[in-house]
Structure formats: structure tokens, C-alpha cells
Image (tube, helix red, strand yellow):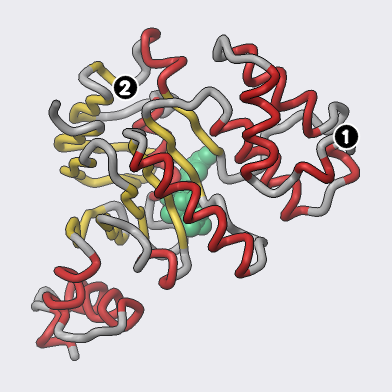
Amino acid sequence: MGDAIAVRGLVVNRGGRRVLDGIDAAVPRGSVTGLLGPSGSGKTTLMRAIVGVQVIAAGTVTVLGLPAGAAQLRHRIGYLTQAPSVYADLTVRENAHYFAALHGRGRAEADRAVADVGLADAAHQLVNDLSGGQRSRASLACALVGEPELIVLDEPTVGQDPVLRADLWARFHELAAAGATLLVSSHVMDEAARCDRLLLIREGRLIADDTPDAIRAAAGVDDLDEAFLRLIRAGESGGTGREAA
Ligand SMILES: Nc1ncnc2c1ncn2[C@@H]1O[C@H](COP(=O)(O)OP(=O)(O)OP(=O)(O)O)[C@@H](O)[C@H]1O
Ligand SMILES: [Mg+2]
């Protein structure tokens, strides 16, 4: 079937600076892949290139077998932007219905998506009146509602409590088990450990593309947080993770 996402030699400049500097990466179908990296390393920019809203300077981005941004992909991709992107003057349910309709889905699917993010009790509240964490879950419901083949989530669990985060990750894995591909950015290492694969970027370059276990082994430590620090320091010193320890 091929990979859901194939990135080759991707270069992106933003604000006159090189922000992605020759990224090669592949995301297998039916998996949950984590995108990790320090603030400003280029996670959001890479996601924007994948969903086809980022001008690129060089390279190719192939998504579900088509060039990123192709019109045929519009209904096949769900994208949660880092800042909530729901309508403040609509209720949670109205937002979900609206995004469902865009994907040719009905109210039942919309209500399911709202329940899946733990917002059933707030479904009739205006988004404007929600807490920050609730608002970002309302956005997440709208990204999931069309049951897209590819789901790109930019920090979907920020501001959520541990119980909700665990529920959301369980839902992500359910979606992957049903055949969807998920790319999820995060700053949180216990979330990285929940991923099938991890992409680690630093200053616009990919420094790891592997399973959590292989990344732990490459760095020579069991703790993923420590493994990332070692890989990042190794990148800075030009050595391997072990040497930087
Ligand atoms: N609109 C923009 N104009 C110019 N430069 C930008 C713009 N957005 C981001 N950048 C720059 O691009 C680089 C990568 O930013 P990006 O948002 O992709 O990082 P990130 O890894 O998502 O960070 P964070 O974890 O803080 O969300 C940063 O140096 C940032 O300053
Ligand atoms: Mg970001």
C-alpha cells in the first residue's frame, strides 16, 4: 500500500530563514507516529507542508499517493492546528455538525466525535464560554469528525488532564487500528512512548526516525526523555548518542 506520507529532501524557508533543511521521512499507514522536537524546531511547519498549506523551497511531499495539497486530498485529511480553530459563536455541537457536513458526514458522526473527546456534557455550550482545554478538544472533535484516512494533530493534548490524555491516546490507537494514519506532535515524553514510531527533529533536521524501543537502544538508555537529550546533544557535537552521555 505504500507509506501514508513520504517526504523527500524537504526544504522550507520562513521569515527569510531556513526552517526545514532537507527532511526525509516516511510515515507508515495504520500507525500512530509522534513528531517530537524542541520549540521552534519545525514541527508545525512540517505538518503544514504535509497538509499542503506551506510554501516549500525544495523537495517533495507525497500524501496518500498524491502531491501534498492536491484537491482530492481535502476530504481525506483531518488537521488540528496548534491554535484552536473552531467558531467561538457556535456551540460545540454546531461546530462539529458544520465540519461533518464539509466531509459529507451526518449528525450522528458529529455527536460521536464530540463524545469521543469528552465533550458530550458541553455539547450545547458556545465555544466562547469553554475553558482553554475544552476549546482545544472541540477543535480536535472537528479534526476527527470526517473519519479521515490521515489525521494530523498539532499538540492535541496540551492543557488536558492525565485521564483525558490517556482517553485521547486510546482513541488515537483505535483509529489507527481501524486503518487511519495519525501524525501527532507533542512535547510530552510519556506520550512519545505511546507512539508506534517517532520522528525527532531539531533545528529543521530529522535526527531520529524509529520506534521508541530502537531510539532507547540507540541512545543506550531506557528513559525516552534522556534518550532524546542524548540524541540532541550528539547532534550538536557531531557524535553518537552514547558518546554524548
Ligand atoms: N509565520 C512565520 N513567519 C516566520 N517564521 C516563522 C513563522 N512561523 C514559524 N516560524 C519560524 O519557523 C521555525 C519553526 O517554527 P515551527 O512553528 O514549525 O516550530 P515548532 O516545532 O512547531 O515549535 P513549537 O513547539 O513551539 O510549536 C521557528 O524558528 C519559527 O520562528
Ligand atoms: Mg508548533
Q: Quadrant of the C terminus?
A: bottom left
First in sequence, mark 2 or 1: give its number: 2
Quick one: SS at disc 2?
Answer: loop
The front one of 162 and 84 is 162
Q: Position of residue 164 (x, y in %)?
A: 63, 60
Q: From what the image shows, is residue 37 above or below residue 101?
A: below
Q: Residues within 10 Å of mark 1 (few under 14, many from 20)?
A: few
What's the mark number on residue 244? none
How many angstroms separate mark 2 from mark 1 (CA)?
Answer: 36 Å
Circle 1 is placed at which residue position? Answer: 124
Residue at the extreme bottom? 245
- The kind of residue tagged 2 is Ala
Residue at 11%, 85% (x, y): give it: 242
Kindly indicate the quadrant of the structure image that contains residue 25: top left
Q: Is residue 136 left or right of residue 58?
A: right
Q: Is residue 208 left or right of residue 128?
A: left
Quick one: SS at disc 1?
Answer: loop
Residue at 82%, 53% (x, y): give it: 131
Q: Position of residue 8 (x, y in %)?
A: 15, 35
Q: From what the image shows, is residue 79 above or below residue 160?
A: above
Q: Is residue 115 left or right of residue 158?
A: right
Q: Position of residue 53 (x, y in %)?
A: 44, 25
- The kind of residue tagged 1 is His
Disc 2 or disc 1, which is closer to the eye?
1
Circle 2 is placed at which residue position? Answer: 68
Q: Position of residue 91 (x, y in %)?
A: 84, 31
Residue at 23%, 81% (x, y): give it: 230
Kindly indicate the quadrant of the structure image that contains residue 191: bottom left
Residue at 43%, 38% (x, y): give it: 152
